[in-house]
Amino acid sequence: METTGCGTALVTPFRADGSVDEPALWALVNWQIESGIDFLVACGSTGEAATLDEEEWLHAIRIVLDAAAGRVPVWAGCTHNCTRALVRQAGLLKRVHGLSAVLSANPYYNKPTQEGQFQHFLALAHAVEPLPVCLYNVPGRTAANLEPETVERLAAAAKNIQAIKEASGKVTQFAELAHIMPRSFKIFSGDDSLALAAIGVGAHGLISVASNEAPKEVTRMVRDALSNNWDEARDLERQFARLFEANFWESNPGPVKTVLSMMGWCSDHMRLPLVPPAPATRSRLERLAGELGLLKHVPVPQGYRAEVF
């Protein structure tokens, strides 16, 4: 896997009736790419993938691919807490041409052991081979931590397991991964607020929530850090640190969708059990977005052809 830098964990825009807002998603992809983002992740946790049915999930991935048109790599989220179901869904991705990688989080709720996670991710890797797999360690959502030693075993057991999105919140875990994994194995921060710390100990980039709202600036922050332009990177981190925190004032992606709606990109509609932020949180977000200069009306282009799966 050659991908490094900043990737956006894209939101999935919804209409008021709960359907996927295809023109808004198409426009977001174009804006991200025009702003210089390095790659895109469709249908991850920020994309509310857990609330999409299978047909919607595949269609949203195809929209992102069609809109990207080969300009940047596109990864697809594929997570399930039943290994059999994960393997079946992953097999469907092999029919979607143009994907650069599959991103998959720890099995949630089950709280599997390290051996259970090893076998789960190995089954996924075999199901999507030769597509590269990026493991996603997010114990705050899944109640299961993927230990660095297990990541090392997985990469040795399957050649297409080539990266990890690390969101444990532990800088020591980033450092251990950087020490034990081959340099060709890519490590991405899953936390905007830890991106510079992660890069400092050897990570290769960031898979970001905040780049939904500020793709140009967050990408520049990551590239500056990777280029050892630390003064510039820290200046951008200081500028946007409040946004990194604000995106988690309530459950993600509520805050980021709210800011995007204020910017004119999409609605703030979410699917239950998630709901838009409370009025008080919305007021705080509006004030912060204004202070950061994010509140500029951006017209959403109408009219495109999404390839039907």
Image (cartoon, helix red, strand yellow):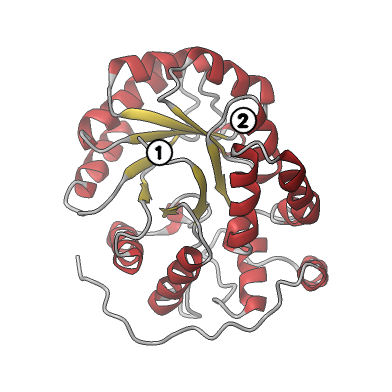
Contact flag, marks 1 and 2 (Cβ < 8 Å): no
Identified at 19% across, 65% down, the residue is: 309
Of the pair 203 and 190, the residue shown nearer to us: 203
- Tell me the SS state at disc 1: strand
Of the pair 92 and 62, the residue shown nearer to us: 62
In this rendering, does residue 200 appear at all?
Answer: yes
Identified at 60% across, 24% down, the residue is: 174
Relative to 4, say whether 242 is above or below.
below
| Disc on the earlier residue, 1 or 2 | 1
In the image, 203: left or right of 25? right
In the image, 264: left or right of 161? right
On the image, the x and y values in percent for residue 67 come to 34, 69
Residue 178 falls in image quadrant: top right
Relative to 156, say whether 101 is above or below.
below
In this rendering, does residue 252 appear at all?
Answer: no
Q: Amino acid at mark 1?
A: Ser
Identified at 33% across, 14% down, the residue is: 156
The crowd level at tag 2 (other Cα within 10 Å; few <14, some 14-19, many 20+) is many
Quarter in which the N terminus is drawn: top left
Relative to 185, say whether 86 is above or below.
below
On the image, the x and y values in percent for residue 224 come to 64, 45
- Tell me the SS state at disc 2: loop
Residue tagged by mark 2? 168
Q: Which mark is residue 206?
A: none
Q: Amino acid at mark 2?
A: Ser
Residue tagged by mark 1? 104
- Per the model, the C-alpha gap separating discs 1 and 2 is 15 Å
